[in-house]
Image (tube, grey):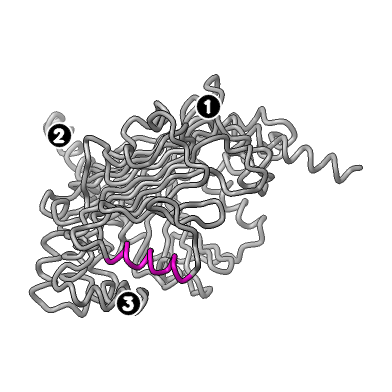
Amino acid sequence: MNPVKKIFQLAFVATLGVVTLVGCSGGDDRDAKTATSALINENKSIVAFGHISVQQLLDKLDYKHLPKAGALLSGELSSWESGVDFSKPVYFAVQAPFAYDGSPELTYMLFDVKDKDSLIDKFNGMGYESTESGDIQCFTNGDVGIGIRNTLAIVLIKGGSPDFTDMLKTAFEQTEGDESTGKTGTILANTGDIVTGLNIERLFTTANTALNRLPADKQKTLNDLVADGYIQTVTNFEKGKVTMKASNLFNDKLKDLLFFKEDPQASVVKKLGSGNAWMGMSANVDVRKMESFLADFVPEGQKKMNNILPGEAAFALAMMGDSPFSKMFSGQFGLVFTGNPGSGMGMIPQFNFFLGLGSQGQFINEQASQYAGLMGLQKQGDAFITEGMAIAPRKDGLYGYTLPENKGNALKIPSFAKDFGKKTFSMFVDFGQINVKSLELEDEMKVLEIMDTFYMTVDREGTDMVMTTKSNSSNILKQIGLFYAKIFEDKMNEMSM
C-alpha cells in the first residue's frame, strides 16, 4: 500500500476515535461553569443561580494574616485547597417550589475538583457515608449529599435526609446537555465576587400559590409579562466599601405595570422639617398601579390588605369605589432622624415624618383627629401633642415630629445620599454621626462600629446599594475580618482569665 495513503488512513481513524471519545464523554470533563449552565437549561424548576469567587474573597479577606484566627482558617482551608480548585468560582442553583418558611425544594453547588483522591480522602476523614454509583463517588451526611466524578463535584442540599444516590446520578446527567443561552448565559459569564440570577418567569410558573388559580386569560397575560424576565445581582467587596447592584432584566411593559415612580424634585424632603439628618427613608409609589396589579393578579393579597384595616377604614375604602387606596394615599412617604443621635439617653431620637394623602385622604385626617380627641391629647395649633411627639393632620398629608419642633434652616441630607427622595425607594444611614459602640449591639452587629455610610436606592431599573467603612486604606472584607478576629481574641483572653 502507498505509505502516504496509509498515513492518511491512520490519521482518519485516530481523528474519528478522538471525536467518538469526546462525544461519549458527556459531562465527565466539563468544568463547573459549563455544567451549571447545562443543569439550568435541563432543569426547568431551577429559579435562582449564580457563582461565588471563593479565592477572590479569601484574598480580599487576607485570612492568612488575621491574628489568632488566621492560623485556624489557614489550617482548615489548606486541607480543602489540595482537592478543590478555588481559583475558579463555586456555582450554585436553587430549585423551586419553595416551602412556607422560604426553603427551596433542592439546592445545588458545583465546583471544580483539583485532585479527586484528595477530596475523597477529605470526606472520608469527616465521617461521611460513602457509596458508588457507576463512576460517581457519593457521600452523604444528613441533609447533604456530595457526588464526585473526575474533575467535577456536585453538592445537593435537601431536607428530610433523602437517598441522594439516584439524585446525584440525575444531577450529573443533567449537566451533560446543551448549555444555557440568552440572559442565563450572560449572568453566569458575569464577573464579580458574588453573582446571582433570579428567573422570574420560572419563579411564577413554579409557584404553588393563588397565581395558579387565576383565570386562564389572566395567567396568559402574566406569563407574557414575565417571559424571559430576570433579576441579576452583582456584589463586590472593594477598598473601604461593598457595592451591590441588582438589575431588573425584564421588559418595559412589566416595568410600566409595576409601582415604580420617581420625583426628580425630591419634594418630600421639603416636608420633613429641618435639622441635620443622620438616617432617613423615603418612598414614591404609584398606588394606582399597585392596586391595579393586585386586583388583576394577586386578588387574595388585596383582600388581606383590606382585612388588616380597622372596620372604619375598610368601610371607607368600600365607599370610595374603584382604586380606593390611590384615592386615600398619594404614595409619598418620608422619615428622617435628626439632631445628635447620642444625646437622647435612651429617649426617642428627634425625627420628622410625612405620609402623603390622596384626593380623598381627609378620612385619614378625620380618624387621626378623632383618635386624638378620644385619647385626650393636647391641641397645639394644627397638631396634637403626645409624649414628646406631635401629629399634625394637614391637607396634603399627615405630618409628625418630635418636640420641641426644630424650625431652623432647611433639612440637611448627607452628600452621599444625593438622590434621597427622588427614587421609588431610598434609604441612608450616616454611621459617622452615630456612636455605635454606645449602643452595645450583639456581636454579629458590632461590625457597624467600623462603618461610615450606607445608602440604597430602588427604581424601575433595579437596586443600588453602597456601604462604606471609616477607613478606605484596605478592603472592607479585611477590615471586617480584623474586627471579628479582635472580638475572638478578646473572648479567648476572657476565658483564660
What type of secondary structure mainly makes up the magenta span?
A: helix
Displayed quadrant of residue 286: bottom left
Disc 2: CA contacts within 10 A as few (<14), some (14-19) or many (>=20): few
Question: Is 216 colored magenta in this rendering?
Answer: no
- On the image, numbered disc 3 is attached to which residue? 312
Which amino acid, mark 1? Asn
Please report whichever mark, 1 or 3, sits nearer to the chain's N-terminal start.
3
Per the model, the C-alpha gap separating discs 1 and 3 is: 54 Å
Give the label on residue 475, or none.
1
Taking 427 as reference, is 377 above or below it? below
Q: Amino acid at mark 2?
A: Phe
Q: Compare residues 44 and 312 and report the one nearer the observer.
A: 312
- From the image, state whether disc 1 or disc 3 is nearer to you: 3
**Image quarter (top left, top right, bottom left or bottom right) of the N terminus:** top left
- Specify the segment rendered in magenta: 363-374
The label nearer to you, 3 versus 2, is: 3
Q: Is residue 274 left or right of residue 84?
A: left
